[in-house]
Image (spheres, rainbow, N blue to C red):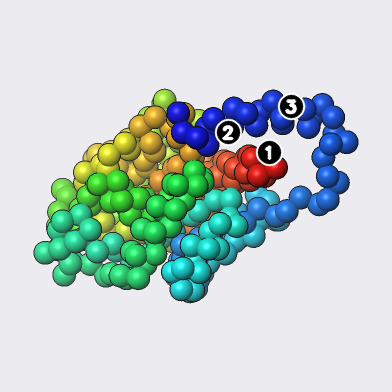
Amino acid sequence: MKIRNLLKLLVLPVLALLITFPSCVNDREPEPIVIGISKALPAKYYGNYAKWLNRVDTGIISVDLYHIPLDSALLLLDGCSGLILSGGPDVFPGRYDQAKDTIKCDIDYYRDTLEWALIRKAKEMEMPILGVCRGLQIFNIYHGGSLYPDIPTDFDSTIMHRCKDKNNCNHAIRVLKNSSLFKITGERTGTVNSNHHQGIHRLGKGLSAIARTDEGLIESIEYESPEDMPFFLGVQWHPERMDTLNPFSMPIAREFIHEAKSYKEREQLISHL
């Protein structure tokens, strides 16, 4: 069992005492929840993740980790309670041993380096992680998985995964009933938006596919044993751009924020032991 898990077991009795004896708790205003986003600006191109989160909790503070030096981004992550790996350009195919396919891709090499380091540190910190579109893909690659570099040429698909009108590019998905995504949304099927030309080919080690298109392309992933791991959910769609009434949008934001708040509470308790 990880040391942090052992600390959590020690923290639970302390938390119970604090609940029983509220006078033991400092009356100061609670510190805000800070969420690190691997790239969120400009919002016109990278999705307005901050507004999406603030629809659930107006007190959430979102910070963009891209437009600063790498070492500064990693230091800033220390003050965060959750990490969103956001959408964006393609991951360099050489990271999954298919460098020959680079010609099919639009690559941001600094973004790759940054997110690789953010994933490593967030995992070490056991911080909640949400991967959106590209974020799902690089998390899969980090764990040894691979991608279809270009769905139209590498995967036999009849579904439009990327359209000129990205606001009206949608398709159906099917969700595994025993998955965290089903627990979050309560839905076995649904419609999500689509704005990508790559997708998961080989799953990374320790990951499980929990939603697919009707033709079998992976649309969502989690850890194989999520009950034994910190929160992680990867989705191929953009929930921050979807209708707030869609069960595959706001329920994901609510669950991620709940996990971030729980993470912050645990970290504060551990720091005071």
Residue 273, disc? 1
Q: Nearer the viewer, residue 64 or 255?
A: 64
Q: Secondary structure at mark 2?
A: helix
Separation (CA) of disc 2 from disc 3: 15 Å
User: Where is residue 236 drawn, in percent x and y?
Assistant: 37, 50
Residue 44, disc? none
Q: Please give the residue where the numbered disc 3 appears in the rendered image.
A: 16
User: Where is residue 152 drawn, in percent x and y?
Assistant: 19, 57
The three-letter amino acid code for the residue at tag 3 is Ala
Callout 1 crowding tier (Cα within 10 Å): few <14, some 14–19, many ≥20: few
User: Where is residue 31 drawn, in percent x and y?
Assistant: 73, 53
Residue 7, disc? 2
Indicate the quadrant where residue 160 lies.
bottom left
Residue at left offset 32%, top offset 70%: 108
Mark 2 vs 3: CB contact within 8 A: no
Q: Is residue 70 above or below residue 227?
A: below
Q: Is residue 105 above or below residue 228?
A: below
Separation (CA) of disc 1 from disc 2: 9 Å
Indicate the quadrant where residue 23 lies.
top right
